[in-house]
Image: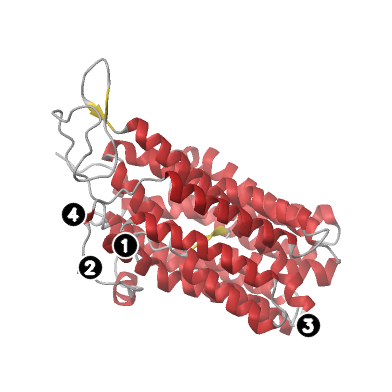
Amino acid sequence: MSGAGLGADRRSCLDCRHHPRITTSAPTGLKNPDRSTTFTKLPSSGEPTLKTTNRRSLLLLFLTLVVVMMGFGMVIPLLGFYVDHFGAGGWALGLLMSSYAVMQFIFSPIWGSLSDRYGRKPILALGILGNALAQLLFCMATQLWMLFAARILAGVLSSATLPTTLAYIGDVTSEDERGGGMGVLGAAMGIGMVIGPGLGGLLAAESLSTPFFLAAALSLAAFLLLLAFLPESLHPDQRKAGVLLRGPQWREMGQALLGPLGAPLLLAGIMSFGLTNFEGVFSLYALQRYGYGPERVGFILMLIGLTSAVMQGGLTGILSRSVGEVWILRGSLLTSGLGFLAMTRAQRYTEVILATLFFVLGNALLRPALASLISKRTTSGQGMAMGLNNAFMSLGRILGPAWAGAAFDWGIQIPYYSGAIIMGFGLLISLRWMEPRQAAAAESPPAA
């Protein structure tokens, strides 16, 4: 994760956006019959605008997602210590993380469909409140099965947050504004995942349960703010009473592997597998090999989030224009594989940090480069393509921790050696089936 981490299927959200026409004849203060927001008039033009209302709604969504992702980030460094406390091994840690990802994979599109039927606000509120409840249940667990029950519940309910937020942004923004709205969403997730691990590690120095109580309290505060101030974006007339509840799109995923997007989509799964394989057992690895506590683990995971944000925001566009996505992928896969190997040789704290940063320097550029390449190779159905991209990344988030946990019990270094092999396999795919000239051709406009 990484944040990542929340493994949501965007397609269910992208397919259900509604953009009713805004007419210039609406008087000031009139309620739009298609949306539960109030228009205001610009003094200079007299035309209605949603910008003021949208800013308030987007700000509230921004704060909500920061809180939710910060709570998620606070938990990740502590899972290994909880597992160790109950006397379990890597298998339990891996399955704890995978069970959460499985529930996200299954229920994200279902919650997106339910938000089309019942509105965005109630589904979003349920997801945030459920996340608070799951955090409390986890920190009060007295047996290992209770940890699994709490993580599964968290995966089921918190998976409502991201797809519903995406749909809300689609409801209240025009096509011109949507990029900015999605940027707000991405920034919120990034900030939460940068702050969360470090804060969780510091708080856990006193008690492992303290970060969970804080995460639950923050989620509850976000829930109350949402109930009090967030307007519903989907008018009852726009809701789809007969909408189908859609789960994972297995058939589409299988068909996509045989098409022109097969190699990039397979790499999306490999990338996600590699990142969660690295992070999945890191807390237990750091505890058993180096004797690190939650503070150091949280700090290192915070560095992962911060480095990823800087790399993605500062270098992706520059490198894409200068060398192209395919060469970015090849360099990133090679660097990530070497980062896995460097972790097996690191002995001191500074060496562990350097090995981690080396891995992240490569892995951080994989996601945006893959998304850009998939988009360029898609002639129609961008929403479908991005949904498939997220689906394959979700599979990686499921399989990565499960494999890393099992491999950890066979040998403490095996997850990182196997991670290097997986990255090498991805590099071979990019060399065999992804030619830079094809990407260049995809970028060029058709001849007149």
Q: Which residue is mark 4?
A: 237
Q: Are marks 1 and 4 in contact (CB under 8 Å)?
A: no
Q: Is residue 266 visible?
A: no
Real-space CA distance between mark 2 and mark 1, rounded to the nearest whole angstrom: 11 Å
What amino acid is at disc 1? Ser
Using a 10 Å C-alpha cutoff, classify the residue at mark 4 as few (fewer than 14 neighbours), some (14 to 19) or many (20 or more): few
Please tell me which of labels 2 and 4 falls first in the chain. Answer: 4
Q: Which mark is residue 351?
A: none
Locate the C terminus and report the quarter of the image it occupies.
top left
What amino acid is at disc 3? Gly
Real-space CA distance between mark 1 and mark 3, rounded to the nearest whole angstrom: 40 Å
Real-space CA distance between mark 1 and mark 4, rounded to the nearest whole angstrom: 19 Å
Discs 2/4, front = 4
Please tell me which of labels 2 and 1 falls first in the chain. Answer: 1
Q: Nearer the viewer, residue 35 or 316?
A: 35
Q: Which residue is mark 1?
A: 12
Real-space CA distance between mark 3 and mark 4, rounded to the nearest whole angstrom: 54 Å
Q: Are marks 3 and 4 in contact (CB under 8 Å)?
A: no
Please tell me which of labels 1 and 4 falls first in the chain. Answer: 1
Q: Residue at x 54, y 75 (%)?
A: 152
Q: Which residue is mark 2?
A: 243
